[in-house]
Amino acid sequence: MVDGLNSSSIRKRARTLSNPNDFQEPNYLLDPGNHPSEHFRTRMSKFRFNVREKLLVFTNNQSLTLSRWQKNYRCAFNDLYFTYTSLMGSHTFYVLCLPIPIWFGYFETTKDMVYILGYSIYLSGFFKDYWCLPRPRAPPLHRITLSEYTTKEYGAPSSHTANATGVSLLFLYNIWGAEACPVTVRLLLTCLVVFYYMTLVFGRIYCGMHGLLDLASGGIIGIACFLIRIYFKCGFPNLHIEKYWWFPLLSVGWGLILLFKHVKPIDECPCFQDSVAFMGVVSGIECCEWMGKRFGFTSVYNLEPNCGWQQTLARLLVGLAFVIIWKEVISKPLVYSLLIKGMRLKDDRDMAARRRLEATRKEGGSSKLECPLYIGEPRIDIVGRFVIYAGIPFTVVVCSPAAFSLLHIA
């Protein structure tokens, strides 16, 4: 759970080693963004490199200050609390929890969150790959995380902060826009939202995952995504998408263009995969809404929000079962068979694997000692992952309500 050592423990370990040659300084090159400037100068445009150099001023010397702050507040309870609450910004959490409001009549709320989260993830991933800035170094910081996956990403902007900012603003907007809600309830809910926000954002510093530039840039992205979503929602209230036969083509095409035109990082960074997933979800929920309004599949809008605990539990069990079965059992073999055998798309996964192996051989095996250079994603994986995640809204919006009606739990 806890990776890395602080500076005092390193010195203590060095003194106690019987053979001084056994001691090795931490290898920061395993994390992306920590290579010398020349590594990026030769692989970036002049403008992109200059932007990165200016932003490095805010990240180069942050680790010591953050480690002292972390040390002051470190304890076993905080380790557990911030480690597990960080899961509220994880991929699995969104897959399982975002559908739940839909099954209780809050389709519009979920759609707002999907837009805000989807574009927050995309923009934070875009700028991560564009700037290629490192996370705070560990050591001297301790990395407290349940997932090694997240430590392999660049630092700024913080996607957790972008998501938390956008969603918190949406919650506050809905809370204070509900006229029927008593003031005392509004204040209580506001306190809960602020508590959630502070936990998720400052937990990134406590866990040694982000610095102040990461949080600030993530917050700006979250605010921008919230404001743009509210602008379009309030500015075009009578936009009847079902009138336009080409709307699904536009939705899918726009999502794929954003993905195929995504900036290429210098070192390997897995955050692009989250961008593919969320762009798929955005397109999926748009196509579901279009199909529902055009062909009359409106059962999702008629779900009773105030039902007994037995109905509530039954909807959760049935709905989550549908999502898990689609995501973990059906989707991958079905989608890839359709793309390869039905649509005749070239399966370039082996080609990408060979490129990665060749790059490793050219480096003389150095990829084991440092973060490897970015090779590129197989095109079929981009399309396949996009379609798989676009299928989740269909499972949630179309299949689950139909099952609720058949089981008399709607």
Image (cartoon, rainbow, N blue to C red):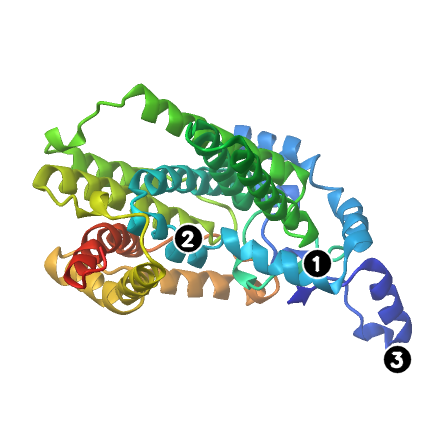
Image x and y of residue 42, in percent: 55, 40
Residue pictured at 30% horizontal, 63% vertical: 327
For label 3, the crowd category at 10 Å Cα-Cα, with few meaning under 14, some 14 to 19 and many 20 or more, is few
Compared with 297, 31 (above or below) is: below
Q: Position of residue 149 (x, y in %)?
A: 52, 60
Q: Is residue 245 left or right of residue 178?
A: left
Q: Is residue 151 visible?
A: no
Gap between marks 3 and 1 measured at Cα? 35 Å
- For label 1, the SS is helix
Please state which amino acid type lies under the numbered disc 2.
Answer: Tyr
Q: Quadrant of residue 243?
A: top left
- Left or right of 322 in this view: 136: right
Which of discs 2 and 3 lies nearer the camera? The answer is 2
> Distance between the Cα atoms at labels 2 and 3?
49 Å
The answer to whether residue 80 shows anywhere in this view is yes
The residue nearer to you, when weighing 12 against 46, is 12
**Residue that appears at 68% across and 48% down:** 205
Q: Which mark is residue 120?
A: none
Which residue lies most toward the bottom here?
18
Residue 358 versus residue 204 in the image, above or below: below
- Please give the residue where the numbered disc 3 appears in the rendered image: 18
- Residue occupied by mark 1: 78
Which residue is label 2 attached to? 94
Regarding mark 3 in the picture, which secondary structure is present there? loop
Q: What amino acid is found at the position of numbered circle 1 in the picture?
A: Asn
For badge 3, the amino acid type reads Ser
